[in-house]
Amino acid sequence: MIGLLRAIRARLTSGSAQQPAGPPPLSGAETAEAEAQLGVTFPQEYRRYLLEVSAGGAVARLARTDGVWWWADSGDTRRDLLALPFPHPDSYDEADDALLRREPRAEDRPDDGEAFSRAWTAWDDEAGEFEDRKTAGAIVLKEHGCGFATLLAVTGPLAGTVWWDGRATCDLIVSLSPDHAAAHGP
């Protein structure tokens, strides 16, 4: 993570007298207020970025709007899941497979389309909740479009690790922090 933040800092401050792009850094009091309100303690490297580089810029902007701290353009991210530990992707493989095996199939209810529709809607709701929980305890550092994002785990044993959310095409969340021992397994 430190390497990533150094690269971001270098990119933002490269050139002779350029100022970093994006909003100014947060104060210590603002950072502490955001952590308290969000119910998390930011990983050290991210906290340092907020305090020394910017409250946004190359990563999603953390801002207080109407007294509420949250990240800009993170409307779909569920606040209620932020304080939960970020789960290692290997920790839910079996549950993911079991959920997929339970997906209702129309051929199992050939004479009752309405019952199939209800069963599939209930399954889809469960699958949606399961997908949301795969990124519990993480924030979107950078949205890349088309369902791709770079995540930062802010809670649990994986706090401070960076992840690629590629579920849009390959159904995987992959560690971008190979130097962090905990990123290698649940």
Image (cartoon, rainbow, N blue to C red):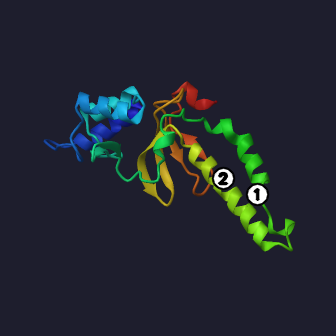
Q: Position of residue 32 (x, y in %)?
A: 31, 29
Q: Position of residue 151 (x, y in %)?
A: 47, 43
SS class, disc 2: helix
Kind of residue sitting beneath label 1: Glu
Distance between the alpha carbons at the discs numbered 1 and 2: 9 Å
Of the two numbered discs 1 and 2 on the same chain, state the one appearing first in sequence: 1
Q: Nearer the viewer, residue 50 or 182?
A: 50
Question: Which residue is most to the left?
Answer: 17
Query: Dot 2 surroundings within 10 Å: few (below 14), some, or many (20 or more)?
Result: some
The correct choice, above or below, for 183 with respect to 113 in the image is above
Give the residue at x 39% y 32%: 3
User: Where on the picture, by quarter, is residue 50?
Assistant: top left
Q: Position of residue 184 (x, y in %)?
A: 60, 31
Q: Are marks 1 and 2 in contact (CB under 8 Å)?
A: yes
The correct choice, above or below, for 30 with respect to 19 in the image is above
Q: Position of residue 131 (x, y in %)?
A: 60, 49
Q: Classify the position of the C terminus by image quarter.
A: top right
Indicate left or right for 128 with 111 as reference: left
Q: Is residue 56 visible?
A: no
Residue highlighted by disc 2 = 127
Residue highlighted by disc 1 = 103
Give the residue at x 59% y 52%: 167
Kind of residue sitting beneath label 2: Ala
The correct choice, above or below, for 7 with respect to 117 in the image is above
SS class, disc 1: loop
